[in-house]
Image (cartoon, helix red, strand yellow):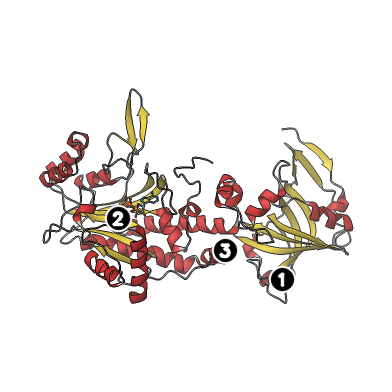
């Protein structure tokens, strides 16, 4: 590729003199497809922003970062340089090391441009509250553009996003604008922290279950019959016929248990054609699914799942404080609390607590979202935990494959798990007898022909088993105390949004 090399006016970059008084080599910039490219000296040894601590005071270092903010004042210009969820204050001041033109040049660089700066690390007397690197600042000696902001991106647009949705004047940006410009919004320190934490949740889920002897499986997402029954399924055209997008990996993970895999999990997309425009519903989300055979009682399944969740909470609490605090700066919330062992209440106990608080509801009625939240608050007050299990749901409100409670047919061996009073998991012991499964499917008006291979799997003998499905975005939203699941979905899909 032919670059159009031009000499950069040295005055814009530095005084042109090294500390030892020798003239420094001429610097060049390259115009590459309209952006300024500042060639990296191969031995430059770039330092990461989070490594800028008082131990580095006095060192001359190079940093490559985005311009987060810039404020010129007289003969100096204050910059905040940002790299993912970390930022540091930097100063260019007219003096021995910087010319007037260089200060002007620095002040005129568009925010969000990527710059290379050479600077001395200085310890500061007063903590810089607004930056992640609070004890040091950079005194810039050279600055060059590595990638300039393209001309048609307005400064205002990037300003509002990259500042966590706030300009210096603390204006807020509405969620749709942010999601329409998601790439810029994802650059904010808050988004960076959210999605690093989300990645860790998946890793902890995988590591914990793998250590427990689970096998990760992949299940098809294009299926011939709605896995959960019901209408909330997307139909797709499939050559000369039609197919559906899986509402969960439910039937397949159970078939893997019938195939003697014993303990399985999967992480993958789940599709719901629900016109639910709420803070916690997406039409595509990431399902963290678990299914396992048990020996004596389905509570073994509950324990296995709650222990996995506790390992995730501990992993985040112990290793992800930087991310948690970064998000907390923009969205303050109480630290997430959990008990060991996890609190397990029966559905009827939950209903009794709600009734005591004045709620009128029937024994077999499902929990509405407001009642779910109220119960979460009551549980927090009484037991001081943000995570609990509600066991033994009424059979009538659960899917066809749920095992009825052998002692009381009104109820079932099924459970939900809650974080900060909102559902994050639904699970149950599953029916492992083909005859009973057939009866229950018929009771739910499910076309048996469509789930024949699923039901047949149980005819060859299946161990007692159970499991659950968790929504990744909900776990991250509720762990961090956020209020909208779109904040924890990188490119959210909801009834009104299919782009970007
Ligand atoms: P809700 O009652 O909140 O609509 P659900 O009972 O339909 O949830 P399940 O089908 O049991 O949920 O799914 C298991 C888990 O998957 C839920 O606990 C939740 O964490 C997640 N989940 C379900 N539906 C959605 C959705 N539309 N968007 C995001 N996550 C979801």
**Secondary structure beneath disc 2?**
strand
Q: Which mark's residue is nearer the viewer, 2 or 1? A: 2
Inspect this view and state whether residue 202 appears. Answer: no
Residue at 27% x, 44% y is 228
- Dot 1, crowdedness within 10 Å: few (<14), some or many (≥20)? some
**Residue 57, numbered circle:** 1
Residue at 87% x, 48% y is 9
Residue at 67% x, 50% y is 158
For the residues labelled 3 and 2, the Cα–Cα distance comes to 31 Å
- Report the side of 277 relative to 90 (left or right): left
**Secondary structure beneath disc 3?**
helix
Give the labeled residue for mark 2: 426
Ligand 1 closer than 8 Å to label 2 CB: yes
Looking at the image, is mark 3 or mark 2 earlier in the sequence?
A: 3
Give the labeled residue for mark 3: 330
Looking at the image, is mark 3 or mark 1 earlier in the sequence?
A: 1
Inspect this view and state whether residue 55 appears. Answer: yes
């Amino acid at each position: 590729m032919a670059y159009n090399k031009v000499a950069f006016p040295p005055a814009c970059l530095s005084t042109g003199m090294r500390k030892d008084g020798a003239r420094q080599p001429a610097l060049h910039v390259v115009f590459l497809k309209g952006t300024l490219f500042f060639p990296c000296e191969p031995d430059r040894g770039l330092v990461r922003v989070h490594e800028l601590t008082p131990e580095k005071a006095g060192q001359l270092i190079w940093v490559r970062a985005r311009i987060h903010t810039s404020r010129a004042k007289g003969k100096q210009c204050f910059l905040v340089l940002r790299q993912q969820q970390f930022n540091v204050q930097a100063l260019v001041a007219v003096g021995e090391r910087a010319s007037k033109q260089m200060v002007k040049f620095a002040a005129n660089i568009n925010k969000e441009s990527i710059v290379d700066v050479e600077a001395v690390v200085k310890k500061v007397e007063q903590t810089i509250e607004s930056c992640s690197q609070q004890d040091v600042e950079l005194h810039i000696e050279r600055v060059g553009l590595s990638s300039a902001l393209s001309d048609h991106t307005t400064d205002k647009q990037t300003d509002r996003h990259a500042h966590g949705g706030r300009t210096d004047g603390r204006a807020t940006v509405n969620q749709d604008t942010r999601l329409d410009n998601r790439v810029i919004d994802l650059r904010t320190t808050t988004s960076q922290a959210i999605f690093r934490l989300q990645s860790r949740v998946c890793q902890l889920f995988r590591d914990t279950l793998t250590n427990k002897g689970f096998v990760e499986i992949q299940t098809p997402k294009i299926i011939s019959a709605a896995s959960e029954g019901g209408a909330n399924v997307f139909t797709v055209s499939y050559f000369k016929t039609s197919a559906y997008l899986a509402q969960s990996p439910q039937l397949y993970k159970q078939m893997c248990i019938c195939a003697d895999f014993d303990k399985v999990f999967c992480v993958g997309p789940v599709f719901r054609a629900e016109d639910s425009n709420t803070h916690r519903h997406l039409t595509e989300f990431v399902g963290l699914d678990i299914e396992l055979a048990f020996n004596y009682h389905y509570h073994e399944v509950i324990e296995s799942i709650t222990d996995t969740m506790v390992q995730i909470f501990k992993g985040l609490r112990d290793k992800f404080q930087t991310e948690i605090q970064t998000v907390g700066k923009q969205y303050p919330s109480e630290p997430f609390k959990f008990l060991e062992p996890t609190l397990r209440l029966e559905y009827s106990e939950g209903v009794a607590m709600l009734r005591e608080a004045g709620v009128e509801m029937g024994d077999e009625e499902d929990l509405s979202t407001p009642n779910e939240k109220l119960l979460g608050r009551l549980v927090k007050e009484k037991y001081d935990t943000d995570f609990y299990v509600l066991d033994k749901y009424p059979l009538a409100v659960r899917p066809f494959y749920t095992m009825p409670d052998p002692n009381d047919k009104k109820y079932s061996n099924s459970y939900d798990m809650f974080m900060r009073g909102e559902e994050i998991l639904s699970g149950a012991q599953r029916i492992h007898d083909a005859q009973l499964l057939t009866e229950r499917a018929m009771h739910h008006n499910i076309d048996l022909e469509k789930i024949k291979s699923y039901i047949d799997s149980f005819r060859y003998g299946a161990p007692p088993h159970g499991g659950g499905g968790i929504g990744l975005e909900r776990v991250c939203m509720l762990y961090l105390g956020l209020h909208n699941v779109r904040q924890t979905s990188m490119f959210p899909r909801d009834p009104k949004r299919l782009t970007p």
